[in-house]
Image (spheres, rainbow, N blue to C red):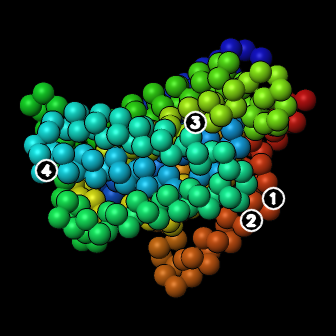
Amino acid sequence: MMPLLKPRTGGLLSLMVILVVLPLFFRNAYHYDVAIQSGLNAIVCVGLNLLIGYTGQISLGHAGFFALGAYASAVLTDRYEFAAVGAMIIGAVAVGCLSYLIARPILKLKGHYLAMATLGLGIIISIILNQEEELTGGPDGMPVSSFSFFGWDISGNLTWYGIVALVLLFTVWLALNLVDSPVGRALRAVHGSELAASTMGVDTQRYKVLIFVFSAVLASIAGSIFAHYSGFVSPAEGEFFRSIEFVTMVVLGGMASIFGAVVGAAILTILPQLLASFHDYEMMVHGAVLMGVMIFMRRGLVPTLVHFIRGLRK
């Protein structure tokens, strides 16, 4: 197989071309908004896929990290007049430290016990954001200052699209290199059999904590960008349903597939918009589409399509 057809080269190049060409087909601000939301969701899902798809550790609380990143940027820039970039970095570091402290004990759990623990974490974060009205604005949310970079206030749909596209490309490149590194091989070993990996000398706890923190930081950065882009944040961004949405995107696109996470995020961001005309039947059609994909494409969209294309070539 030629090098350009490999995921780290051909796949990344294809994604780059798609992101560059897409704005040519946008006709209004709504199209840009859907694309930007898809990109931000994809950033979160790439990190979450490393945790779920490659390491085999479920998390039902990643929306909490997304919301923490968003509120860190909102509070620090609006209440304490921090620079937007500084607030984003502080938020990412704080979320990284928090996720590290949580990951040490929580990742000792397995299966549904781990799922329930991460679910509880997300609920706790959501409750705090709702209750701390003086700091977060409570259920009503709070406005967010514009993103200023060296005196330049970032605005305009194309500018925001470009920023999200660059961050997404960098995230995918980073994830692909991580997967192909010794760390990636250790993650797959943990997923295959944690006991066997431990027997072979792999520090399973260390790698699980590492990838949990990495995915949480990615979620925090995506949340910070979302906060400045939308100009407003609310506790709804950290609710349980949002975490389920992220997990569904990962499963739909294909677990243990970096590009699958991007595709799944794009589909589940765009699909509700396409089904809006069905009104009362929107959720029914949405559920039917998801069920159909999971029944006939159990490995997810991208891995199934790749397997099918390789079969045709043979």
- Give left or right: position of 44 versus 131: right
In the rendered image, residue 148, in percent from the top left (x then y), is placed at 15, 37
Residue name at image x 49 percent, y 58 percent: 121
Helix or strand or loop: what does disc 3 sit on? Answer: helix
- Give left or right: position of 2 versus 9: right
In the rendered image, residue 305, in percent from the top left (x then y), is placed at 75, 43
Q: Mark 4 points at which residue?
A: 78
Disc nearer the start of the sequence (3/1)? 3
Q: Quadrant of the C terminus?
A: top right
Compared to 302, does 271 lie above or below?
A: below
Q: Image quadrant of residue 290? A: bottom right
What number is the disc on residue 25? none
Marks 1,2: beta carbons within 8 A? yes
Q: Nearer the viewer, mark 2 or mark 3?
A: 3
Q: Which of marks 3 and 4 is in front?
A: 3
Whole-number angstrom distance, CA of label 4 to CA of label 2: 45 Å
Q: Mark 1 points at which residue?
A: 296
Could you tell me if residue 235 is visible in this image?
no
Q: Mark 3 points at which residue?
A: 209
Q: Name the residue under label 2.
A: 292
Amino acid marked by disc 1: Phe
